[in-house]
Amino acid sequence: MKTPELTQTELLRYSRHLLLPEVGLEGQQKLKAASVLIVGTGGLGSPLALYLAAAGIGRLGLVDYDAVDRSNLQRQIVHGTHTTGWKKVDSAAERLRDLNPDIHIDTYDMVFNSENALDLADPYQILVDGTDNFPTRYLLNDLAVLTGKPYVYGSIFRFEGQISVFDARRGPCYRCLFPAPPPPDSAPSCAEAGVFGVLPGTVGTIQATEVIKLILGIGKPLIGRLLLYDALEMILQEIKLRKNPDCPVCGTHPVIHELIDYEAYCGVPVRSDAHAGTTEWDISPVELKTQLGSQRPPLLIDVRTPVEQQIAVLPGALLIPLEELPAKIADLPKGKRLVLFCRQGVRSARGVRMLRAAGFDLAFNLAGGSNAWSREVDPAVNQY
């Protein structure tokens, strides 16, 4: 491929890079010739996209199906108040083009899945996970192994983060560390557990650093190393990773030869958390209001945390955080109608499945959670 020349405008824009012997003119030309696919334009995808665009990566692909919500703005800094309601890929692309009009940006407003992953990844050198969920993580890892491309991994949870580079040609892949996806409901999402606003900025920036190092061929990439970051204690730790000869996708005798979707394994919704709790046992806020006014009202059970109850309260609800529910099942009345709720209906749906499995045939889930109750029944209840 012909090395792209830098314009006078680009020479001025990247002058601080050009002064670095490790980058220089040749390195900046490599960056201009490079292509990176970022799956997700949320907390991790925001700093990733911003710094890769600022660095002069010639072609960026952005994949996301979601729209910008006000609750995103605490950490998803590529978006802004005026783009609330926009498609995330459009919102991000506008900001990136303003930051650097000299690069090419592709937007893909779609779910990243096994059917389109190969086509989406084909034009790009490096794959980056900006979504932080298990289905995407395993799909990207398998895609990287099968196509011989590096996969830059990042993960966040509350105050902690993880970063690595998985390249099966030179080291282990993600499945060498975790061979199979976790069971459904085993790990809460950021929407359920919360996330420290600056954490994805730190983790995403380190991911962007690794991408640029890979393109330039400088420094020591995080291949075979897992970096652990604790924001509360401000501690960085490193764990050495080894290639697993029995890995199902990159081992000596691989058994995975094609891509599949992992939503069913991981319990993560295909679209968004707002619809994640939908089950055959859902009831609507309006229906719940009617039932609460009847002669035999249901028992409302709040499976959120005490911290969340301080934000929004549904009158008369019994607080039993989801993690405490198994220990308190025996105290619940089996013959009474039970309606569980959380913020969006995700955790409460898990609680209902738990109760139904224990013989509570009258357990139901408030679809959309307390936020839906606020929108459809009582606007005095705070949304968050």
Image (cartoon, rainbow, N blue to C red):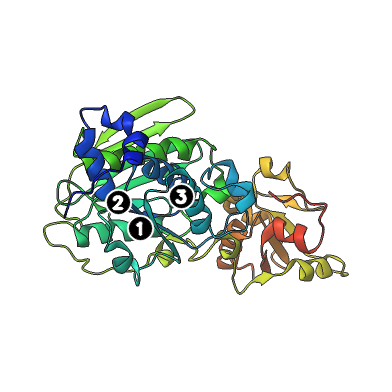
Disc 1 crowd, CA 10 A, few/some/many (<14, 14-19, 20+): some
Extreme front residue here? Answer: 8
Give the residue at mark 3: 97
Asked which secondary structure carries label 2, the reply is loop
Residue 326 - label? none
Q: Report which residue position mark 2 lands on.
A: 178
Q: Give the mark toward the camera: 3 or 2.
A: 3
Name the foreground residue: 225 vs 337. Answer: 225
Q: Earlier in the sequence, mark 3 or mark 2?
A: 3
Figure quadrant of residue 6: top left
Q: In the displayed structure, would residue 310 be above or below residue 378?
A: above
Q: CA distance from mark 3 to mark 2?
A: 37 Å
The picture places residue 292, in percent across and down from the top left corner, at 83, 65
Looking at the image, which residue is at 69% across and 65% down? 334
Q: CA distance from mark 2 to mark 1?
A: 7 Å
- Residue 192 visible somewhere in the drawing: yes
Is the residue marked by circle 2 packed among few (<14), some (14-19), or many (20+) residues within 10 Å?
few
Q: Residue at x 66, y 55 (%)?
A: 342
User: Is label 3 in contact with label 2 (beta carbons under 8 Å)?
Assistant: no
What's the mark number on residue 181?
1
The residue under the point 27% across, 31% down is 18
Q: Position of residue 77 (x, y in %)?
A: 53, 43
Q: Secondary structure at mark 3?
A: helix
